[in-house]
Image (spheres, rainbow, N blue to C red):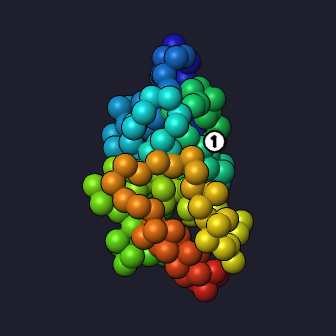
Amino acid sequence: MPVVSLTINGTSVVKDVAANTLLVQFIRDELGLTGTHVGCDTSQCGACAIHVNDMPVKSCTMLAVQADGCKITTIEGLAPDDNLHPMQQAFHEHHGLQCGFCTPGMVMTAVAFAKDNPDATEQQVRRALEGNLCRCTGYQNIIDAVLDGAKAMREAG
């Protein structure tokens, strides 16, 4: 069985893993980080979005062995202290969620987008979130949250 060595949310992990284990399964089942959700099993919904080497990735599209040597951040590691990340705070303030199932993936995608696009327009945010599906909302609160979260991230430096 292959061995995977990676850093997840600032913690080094070395574990045996079956070669066909998806990264999302490894994160949830082997590491117990259940904030990363499996929503569709077809890489359509974005509920499993995480950051791999600071890039947004749908973790259901990557094998755990492909993450060997990588730095991974999940929703649990986005704000390691007791404070919310500015994007999480914006989702809270704008009620950019309903059931919350898609929220971790939305937030992770939004954070990566906002880092590269701190002055994004509403249309740019809508395009950036096209790979993240929400079955509960009309998306407007999510869009408002991303715009506000991007502003807060920019102001925080």
Q: Is residue 133 left or right of residue 52?
A: left
Q: Amino acid at mark 1?
A: Cys
Residue ID at (55%, 40%): 58
> Where residue 131 sits: x, y (%)?
57, 46
Q: Quadrant of residue 99?
A: bottom left
Nearer-the-camera pick, 99 or 8: 99
Asked whether residue 51 appears in the rendered view, the answer is: no
Nearer-the-camera pick, 114 or 23: 114
Nearer-the-camera pick, 36 or 144: 144
Asked whether residue 55 appears in the rendered view, the answer is: yes
Q: Is residue 39 left or right of residue 14?
A: left
Residue ID at (57%, 31%): 61
Please, is residue 144 above or below residue 16 in the view? below
* Label 1 environment density (alpha carbons within 10 Å; few <14, some 14–19, many ≥20): some
> Where residue 20 sits: x, y (%)?
52, 17
> Where residue 13 sits: x, y (%)?
49, 39
Q: Which residue is mark 1?
A: 70
Element class at badge 1: loop
Quarter of the figure with the C terminus: bottom right
